[in-house]
Amino acid sequence: MAHIKHRVAERMDILDDVLEAYADDTENHELLVKASNSKSDYLRLPNEEFENKTRSVIELLEANVSLMGDHGLTQDQIEDVKLMFGTYQDKRGKPRSYRIASRSATKNIAELLDVADDALERLDRVMKRFKRSNASFYIGYLTARTIVDD
């Protein structure tokens, strides 16, 4: 369990740095105070406080994710730490709120893959216009679109 806590603290430190940079750039001093955490700050906290702090910062990140794209934050990074945090909570036998959220996200993956497939099918139709006018480009596209099963 300590290993998972370390991994969560490492990821939170990285995300905190992004949040801190955003808060500093926007001169949001209240957010800056909440985002100035390091890995060791997280690890020093007792388990209950660690969970509360992690939840709190994740909520701040999710509330600002759309504004922090220029700072390198993505929803995938937040989901990654939420999954890891859910594993930590599982090991401690804590509430299921994050586990439920991560399962919901997993169910949404299938829907998102369907959307991606539709987009790729539309792109395939668009790329056909290059079949004769720029054959090497078209062949390169087809090669890149080939799915490799491991």
Image: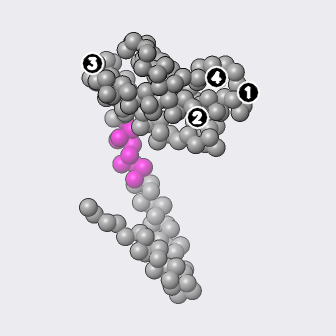
Which comes before the other along the chain, label 3 or label 2?
Answer: 2
Q: Which mark is residue 93?
A: 3
Give the percent coordinates (x, y) of residue 50: 42, 17
Q: Residue at x 37, y 70 (%)?
A: 146
Q: Which mark is residue 27?
A: 1
- Choose mark 2 or mark 4, whichever is in front: 2
Q: Which mark is residue 132?
A: none
Q: Is residue 138 visible?
A: yes
| Label pair 1/4, CB-CB below 8 angstroms | no
Give the percent coordinates (x, y) of residue 89: 32, 22
Determine the image quadrant of residue 90: top left
Give the percent coordinates (x, y) of residue 91: 27, 23
Residue type (three-letter) at the residue carrying disc 3 = Gly
Residues in magenta, as a range: 104-113
Q: Residue at x 31, y 23 (%)?
A: 2
| Label pair 1/2, CB-CB below 8 angstroms | no
Which comes before the other along the chain, label 1 or label 2?
Answer: 2
Q: Residue at x 64, y 23 (%)?
A: 32
| Label pair 4/3, CB-CB below 8 angstroms | no
Q: Disc 4 marks which residue?
A: 31
* Disc 3 to disc 2, C-alpha distance: 30 Å
Which comes before the other along the chain, label 4 or label 3?
Answer: 4
Which comes before the other along the chain, label 2 or label 4?
Answer: 2
Q: Is residue 59 visible?
A: no
Q: How is the image coloured?
A: one colour
Q: Disc 2 marks which residue?
A: 18
Determine the image quadrant of residue 16: top right
Does 24 appear above or below 92? below
- Choose mark 3 or mark 2, whichever is in front: 2
Residue type (three-letter) at the residue carrying disc 2 = Val
